[in-house]
């Protein structure tokens, strides 16, 4: 029995293995417990192991690579078409992974290092706290609005809202207690967000790629750090459009019979990077009148013809393409469309 490829369907405690030979014939189908997985691959002759890029896949990639196997990660959406309809189970999933990986045009996902995952953990934690902070702020404003109290928007206005609530004698004591509790939780989250942002900004200043990305208008240290930590090898994207498409910033296509129909953006790929690019583009749209560069002139001309939100997404797409060029050439951004060497920028 000669196994050249193993499809590994991972889970928390149960792992499904589907091994095939060079002809694609199934030679082994086995379900393993978590404690038995390493022992199995220690006895198995070196082969190609393919997993879906999700969960702890990067961890298992490092573990199995250390045992001498060639490990590849494949996007879950590339495996889904090969799962037999109406027969969804672990064994079928493992077989579908092998089938998808054997296709000549398949694209694999690069494995992340421990350092990359450490930085991405900071970003994930910060994103979660910001989301919770927004929920608490909205709850505070909603409760205060029921008593006719409002303040201007902004997270920094919550202290002002709390002062107004405390000064209002009409609001019941229990309502004040509820709003004060939400305010205390929000302040605690603010401290956590600030701590994570400090670490992220420090990474952005140390990392060469992040420093280059931060020279692009609309991309700050947090966005630059996230892109640098997520995109291990920018050369995997042959063109700037491929990178923008990977981020889901290109329009959907529904074309047939020679007629091209474009819709809204696909929103595939990394959601957090796409969100930060759109937020950065939004800030630049507000400052379009004072943006003296070729991109600024393009932005002002498009704003005259298109809705603001559409222009914002278009600018985010352009920012993604500029980021690809900056990372590919290993140079910094220059407003007139050129680039300068990092050594010159540092001087």
Image (spheres, rainbow, N blue to C red):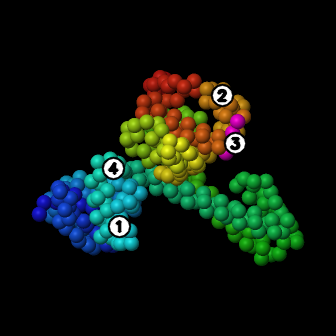
Kindly tell me whether residue 204 is visible in this rendering: no
Q: Where is residue 246 in the image (x, y as percent from the top left)?
A: 46, 46
Query: Taking 243 as reference, is 68 above or below it?
Result: below
Marked residue nearer the N-terminal end (1 or 2): 1
* Residue named by callout 4: 106
Query: Taking 200 as reference, is 2 above or below it?
Result: below
Q: Residues within 10 Å of mark 2 (few under 14, many from 20)?
A: some
CB under 8 Å between discs 1 and 2 = no
Q: Where is residue 35 in the image (x, y as percent from the top left)?
A: 26, 71
Marked residue nearer the N-terminal end (4 or 3): 4
CB under 8 Å between discs 2 and 3 = no
Q: Does the magenta stretch include residue 307?
A: yes
For the residues labelled 3 and 1, the Cα–Cα distance comes to 44 Å
Q: Which dot marks residue 308?
A: 3
* Residue named by callout 1: 84
Residue drawn at 51 percent across, 34 percent down: 322
For the residues labelled 2 and 3, the Cα–Cα distance comes to 15 Å
Residue drawn at 35 percent across, 64 percent down: 83
Q: Position of residue 189 (x, y in %)?
A: 61, 60
Name the image quarter holding the N terminus.
Answer: bottom left
Marked residue nearer the N-terminal end (2 or 3): 2
Q: Magenta-highlighted stretch: main secondary structure?
A: loop
Q: Left or right: 226 with respect to 116?
A: right
Residue drawn at 43 percent across, 36 percent down: 239
Q: Left or right: 287 with respect to 76?
A: right
Kindly tell me whether residue 104 is visible in this rendering: yes
SS for dot 4: loop
* Residue named by callout 2: 297
Marked residue nearer the N-terminal end (2 or 4): 4
For the residues labelled 2 and 4, the Cα–Cα distance comes to 40 Å
Residue interval drawn in magenta: 305-309
Instruction: Find the residue positioned furthest to the right.
Output: 170
């Amino acid at each position: 029995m000669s196994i050249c490829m193993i499809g590994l369907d991972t889970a928390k405690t149960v792992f499904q293995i589907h091994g095939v030979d060079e002809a694609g014939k199934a030679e082994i189908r086995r379900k393993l417990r978590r404690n038995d997985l390493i022992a199995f691959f220690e006895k198995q002759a070196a082969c190609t192991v393919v997993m879906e890029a999700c969960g702890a896949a990067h961890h298992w990639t490092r573990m199995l690579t250390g045992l001498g196997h060639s490990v590849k990660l494949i996007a879950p959406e590339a495996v889904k078409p090969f799962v037999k309809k109406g027969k969804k189970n672990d064994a079928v999933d493992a077989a579908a992974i092998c089938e998808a990986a054997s296709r000549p045009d398949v694209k694999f996902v690069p494995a992340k290092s421990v350092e990359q995952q450490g930085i991405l953990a900071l970003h994930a934690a910060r994103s979660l706290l910001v989301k919770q902070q927004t929920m608490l702020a909205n709850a505070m404003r909603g409760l205060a609005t029921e008593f006719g109290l409002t303040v201007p928007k902004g997270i920094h206005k919550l202290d002002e809202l709390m002062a107004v609530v405390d000064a209002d004698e009409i609001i019941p004591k229990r309502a004040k207690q509820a709003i004060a509790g939400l305010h205390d939780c929000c302040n605690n989250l603010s401290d956590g967000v600030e701590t994570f942002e400090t670490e992220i900004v420090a990474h952005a200043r140390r990392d060469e790629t992040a420093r280059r990305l931060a020279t692009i208008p609309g991309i700050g240290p947090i966005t630059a750090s996230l892109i640098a930590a997520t995109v291990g090898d920018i050369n995997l994207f042959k063109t700037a459009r491929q990178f923008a498409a990977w981020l889901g910033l290109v329009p959907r296509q529904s074309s047939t019979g020679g007629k091209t129909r474009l819709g809204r953006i696909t929103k595939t790929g990394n959601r957090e990077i796409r969100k930060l690019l759109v937020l950065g583009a939004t800030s630049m749209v507000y400052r379009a009148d004072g943006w003296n560069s070729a991109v600024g002139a393009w932005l002002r001309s498009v704003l005259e013809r298109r809705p603001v939100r559409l222009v914002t997404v278009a600018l985010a797409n352009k920012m993604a393409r500029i980021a690809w060029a900056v990372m590919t050439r290993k140079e910094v951004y220059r407003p007139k469309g050129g680039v300068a060497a990092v050594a010159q920028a540092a001087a």
